[in-house]
Image: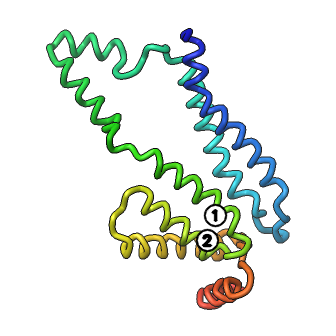
Amino acid sequence: MTRMRVRIVRALPFFIVLGVGFWLWYTAGGFALGRAGHIGPEIWPRAILVLLIASAVVGAIQALVRGADEGGASALIKSATKAVGREGEIEADLQIEAGDPRTRRPFWAGIGIVLLLGFVAVVPYLGFTLSTFLLMFGIILCAGYQKPLIAGVTAAAGTLAFFIVFQRLVYVSLPLGVGPFKELSTALMAALGVK
């Protein structure tokens, strides 16, 4: 594989994220308009998308500029550490930073992505509150956390924090869900004094 091809393959995930970011930017423009004098609901997703798009651009540029054979330490660092007889130490440090391949969990990372896509699919039916709780709980467990009770409390606290920020600070209308899920969302809103 030529060096340029290696660089393009390495940059491909960033280009995919960039494309998805622009598509989501366009989609956010179709959100319903907010009340006069208030920030519209599209502002917050777009603010996050600016960060996503900027990160993808930086990542793509780094992947395209970095040499195809660059992996660990730069040539300057390798030369300096070799000169003082510490080449083995820098390689060990880089291995620690990169993480042990045996501890990587690509299957669970894939499950996390499925959970995120499932969140998008079920949020109109279950409502923001329950969907967000299930998403956070699932991601915490997929990340390898072994205590479900603490994971549940953490997910509940995170869900409540998101709910308060969206309902009390930025006035974004959240999906309430249908049937009993709508009643749950309405009860939570009433408890927090949201109309």
Q: Quadrant of residue 152?
A: bottom left
Disc 2 to disc 1: CB gap under 8 Å: yes
**Residue at 68% from the left image edge and 37% from the top image edge:** 18
Q: CA distance from mark 2 to mark 1?
A: 6 Å
**Residue at 61% from the left image edge and 71% from the top image edge:** 131
Picture coordinates of residue 48 (x, y %)? 64, 51
Q: Quadrant of residue 140?
A: bottom left
User: Residue 42 vs residue 165: left or right?
Assistant: right
The 10 Å Cα crowd at callout 1, few under 14, some 14 to 19, many 20 or more, is many
Seen from this angle, which residue lies furthest left? 85
The amino acid pointed to by label 1 is Phe
Picture coordinates of residue 15 (x, y %)? 66, 32
Picture coordinates of residue 61 (x, y %)? 59, 24
Looking at this view, is 59 or 20 the one in front? Answer: 20
Q: Where's the C terminus, which quadrant?
A: bottom right
The amino acid pointed to by label 2 is Ser
Q: Which mark is residue 131?
A: 2
**Residue at 50% from the left image edge and 18% from the top image edge:** 66
Q: Counting residues from the N terminus, which is met first, the one under dot 2 or under dot 1?
A: 1
Label 2: element kind? helix
User: Residue 33 vs residue 161: left or right?
Assistant: right
Picture coordinates of residue 148 (x, y %)? 38, 71
Q: Quadrant of residue 150?
A: bottom left
Q: Is residue 96 above or below residue 47?
A: above
Q: Is residue 172 above or below residue 55?
A: below
Label 1: element kind? helix
User: Residue 34 vs residue 104: left or right?
Assistant: right
Which residue in the protein does label 1 denote?
119
